[in-house]
């Protein structure tokens, strides 16, 4: 009977390891969205889980808006998902926002909407204040107020 208990513990331990590895892969290893800005090229780009990306040049922007309200209509995933903590990635569609690429945390209600006529992306930073500040800096840069 001792061998059976040891084997049972080994199976339980293996199951716990497999569950932990799966949770890590789906919720942690997929990564959080990141943003890259190039002053010299006048562009900004986003990179998210599962090779999701979007790139914009300031000269081609047709839409640059700040949404700062409660309960935005994030819509439904077309080709994307949500990882741990409400971080959305991929392509989403809503009635109020249209179709967009998400690089956004739904915990933070403020977000920036950028579009160039071909694609739209919605993104935010770690909190409302820094999202607002980033938006103001992006508008100033687009208007040539920042060098």
Image (tube, helix red, strand yellow):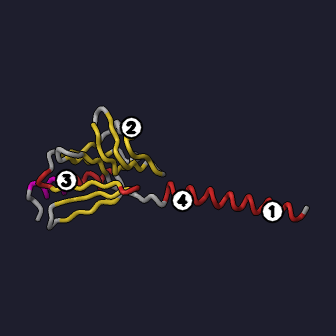
First along the sequence among labels 3 and 2: 2
Q: Position of residue 15 (x, y in %)?
A: 68, 57
**Residue 45 location, quadrant:** bottom left
Find disc 3 in the rendering and name its residue.
Answer: 136
Q: Residue at x 40, y 55 (%)?
A: 50
Find disc 4 in the rendering and name its residue.
Answer: 24
Instruction: Quote the CA–CA distance across marks 2 and 4.
Output: 24 Å
Residue 116 in view here = yes
Crowding at dot 2, Cα within 10 Å, few <14 / some 14-19 / many 20+, comes out as some
Task: Spot the residue most to the top.
Answer: 95
Pointers 1 and 2 in contact (C-beta within 8 Å) = no
Label 3 or label 2, whichever lies nearer to me, is 2
Crowding at dot 3, Cα within 10 Å, few <14 / some 14-19 / many 20+, comes out as some
First along the sequence among labels 2 and 4: 4
Callout 1 secondary element? helix
Q: Position of residue 111 (x, y in %)?
A: 29, 47
Name the side, left or right, on which 125 lies relative to 144.
right
Q: Position of residue 34 (x, y in %)?
A: 33, 60
Label 1 or label 3, whichever lies nearer to me, is 1
Magenta residues, start to end = 136-143
Q: Position of residue 62 (x, y in %)?
A: 14, 45
Find disc 1 in the rendering and name its residue.
Answer: 7
């Amino acid at each position: 009977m001792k061998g059976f208990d040891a084997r049972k513990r080994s199976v339980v331990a293996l199951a716990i390891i497999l569950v932990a590895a799966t949770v890590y892969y789906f919720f942690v290893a997929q990564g959080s969205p990141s943003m890259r800005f190039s002053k010299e090229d006048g562009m900004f780009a986003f990179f998210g889980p599962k090779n999701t990306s979007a790139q914009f040049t300031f000269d081609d922007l047709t839409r640059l808006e700040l949404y700062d309200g409660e309960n935005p209509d994030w819509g439904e995933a077309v080709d994307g998902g949500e990882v741990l903590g409400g971080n959305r990635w991929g392509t989403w569609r809503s009635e109020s926002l249209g179709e967009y690429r998400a690089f956004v945390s739904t915990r933070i209600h403020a977000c920036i909407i950028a579009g160039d006529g071909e694609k739209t992306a919605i993104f935010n930073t770690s909190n409302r204040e820094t999202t607002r500040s980033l938006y103001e800096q992006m508008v100033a840069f687009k208007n040539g107020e920042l060098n």
